[in-house]
Amino acid sequence: MNRLSALSILLLCAVSSAFAATAQKPMLSVTTLDGKPFDLAAQKGKWVVVNFWATWCSPCLKELPDISAFVGAHKDKVAAIGLDFEDTDKAEVEKFLQKHPLTYPVAQVDIDNPPKDFEAPKGLPNTYVIAPDGHVAKAFLGPVTSKDLESAVAGG
């Protein structure tokens, strides 16, 4: 086998294993900052935006209003959950959300033990668009816009 073929196979394996960690139909059950349960399975029939972010992440800060506006404009068919992925206390996140209010719930997730059906983010923001039947329709690494979300839902 020549070097180029071997390198291609290694690259293909690396790329496919990077995506293997997120389940095709992920489960997610968390408690939001306001103490309410959020269960992805209970959202069946709706599109769901699952967004990993952090208060210190400037690209996250840029995308949060777009996600919030998109969810607010499509609340009949789209839900969302924000997953604060950082080592900080609840009061700091709540203070951040007072300055940057969202139209959807937020939960803190343990950076050392992230939700098992989602790959631990390799960067932030990291967003998944879950189709009404529960499968991952689109995954984004980096900031998303309302247009990106609209395209994901339309192409879903």
Image (cartoon, helix red, strand yellow):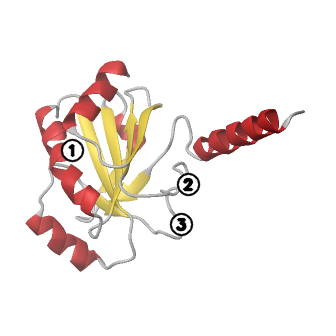
Residue at x 15% of width, y 74% of height: 95
Residue at x 17% of width, y 29% of height: 76
State left or right for residue 93 relative to residue 41.
left
Residue 67 at x, y = what percent?
Answer: 21, 44
Residue at x 24% of width, y 54% of height: 105
Q: Quadrant of residue 85?
A: bottom left
Q: Amino acid at mark 2?
A: Lys
Q: Amino acid at mark 3?
A: Asn
State left or right for residue 56 relative to residue 14.
left
How far apart are labels 2 and 3 at the CA level?
8 Å
Residue under numbered circle 2: 116
Residue 79 at x, y = what percent?
Answer: 26, 39
The secondary element bearing badge 2 is classed as loop
Q: Amino acid at mark 1?
A: Ile
Q: Earlier in the sequence, mark 1 or mark 3?
A: 1
The secondary element bearing badge 1 is classed as helix
